[in-house]
Image: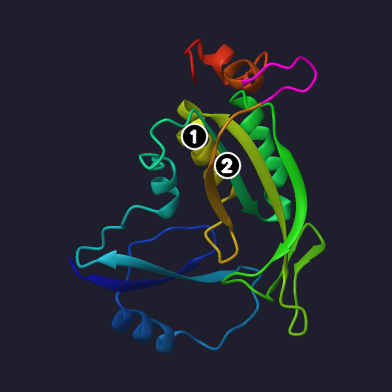
């Protein structure tokens, strides 16, 4: 089904039935000269089909993500590496902890992707690069988990880090051969397991 662009001129925060481009142009031309009234207007552009129906949002797709681990059928553990916006870290950590993910490593890094060199502001703090500094500030998270937890963890991170703008980041999933807990010498599942973690919260072994 071919997509058609629909536009509407509505008060910020409000919703209305999509208008087509011709109606929008006519309505805009008929408007009187702008006078400040304290009421903000926002231009909403959405990608709709011929009947005005909205497609599934990217965020909805993130909620059903499934990672293809078929290339490593015998691997029991994986490392999820996520590169996210620094100001999204607290939200991601909060949601991971609420789901029973206790162990993680976090570090400040710089990198370049589609966003390269673009600055952004959040909470009065400026993030990103400049025309003479191409690398962008990012936060890296590393989480080693059991195979059965991969999809859940990836969905949580992607959903909590998502803004829909360029620069949201990427997630990589790496196979891990084994795990060793230095304090006790435990290996494998015993070393990976943490008291009060996802397995304890769900009661499902291996999750």
> Which coloring applies here?
rainbow
Along the viewing direction, whichever of 7 and 2 lies nearer the viewer: 2
Q: Is residue 87 left or right of residue 82?
A: right
Image x and y of residue 96, in percent: 62, 32
Reading the image, the residue beneath label 2 is 80
Q: Position of residue 118 (x, y in %)?
A: 68, 75
Residue behind mark 1: 150
- Residue 133, by quadrant, is bottom right
Q: Is residue 172 above or below residue 130?
A: above
Q: Residues within 10 Å of mark 2 (few under 14, many from 20)?
A: many
Q: CA distance from mark 1 to mark 2?
A: 8 Å
Instruction: Mark 1: give few (<14), some (14-19) or many (20+) Cα within 10 Å.
Output: many
In the image, residue 187 sits, relative to residue 69, either above or below, namely above
Asked where in the image residue 188 lies, by quadrant, the reply is top right
Kindly check if marks 1 and 2 are in contact, taking CB atoms under 8 A apart as contact. yes
Q: Residue at x 40, y 71 (%)?
A: 8
At a point 38% along the width and 42% down the height, the residue shown is 71
Instruction: Tell me residue 181's x, y (percent).
Output: 72, 22
- Dot 1: element: helix
Residue stretch in magenta: 180-187
Question: Mark 1 or 2 closer to N-term?
Answer: 2
């Amino acid at each position: 089904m071919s997509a058609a662009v629909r536009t509407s001129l509505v008060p910020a925060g409000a919703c209305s039935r999509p208008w087509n481009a011709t109606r929008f142009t006519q309505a805009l031309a008929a408007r009187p000269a702008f006078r400040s009234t304290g009421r903000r207007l926002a231009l909403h552009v959405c990608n709709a089909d011929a009947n005005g129906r909205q497609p599934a949002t990217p965020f909805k797709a993130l909620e059903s993500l499934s990672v293809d681990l078929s290339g490593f059928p015998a691997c029991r553990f994986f490392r999820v590496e996520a590169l996210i916006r620094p100001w999204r870290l607290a939200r991601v950590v909060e949601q991971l902890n609420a789901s029973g993910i206790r162990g993680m490593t976090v570090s400040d890094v710089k990198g370049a992707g589609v966003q390269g060199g673009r600055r952004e502001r959040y909470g009065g703090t400026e993030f990103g690069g400049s025309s003479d500094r191409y690398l962008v500030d990012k936060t890296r998270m590393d989480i080693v988990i059991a195979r059965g937890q991969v999809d859940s963890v990836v969905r949580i991170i992607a959903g909590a880090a998502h803004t829909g703008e360029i620069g949201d980041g990427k997630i990589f999933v790496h196979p891990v051969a084994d795990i060793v807990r230095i304090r006790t010498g435990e290996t494998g599942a015993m070393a990976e397991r943490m008291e009060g973690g996802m397995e304890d919260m769900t009661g499902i072994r291996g999750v």
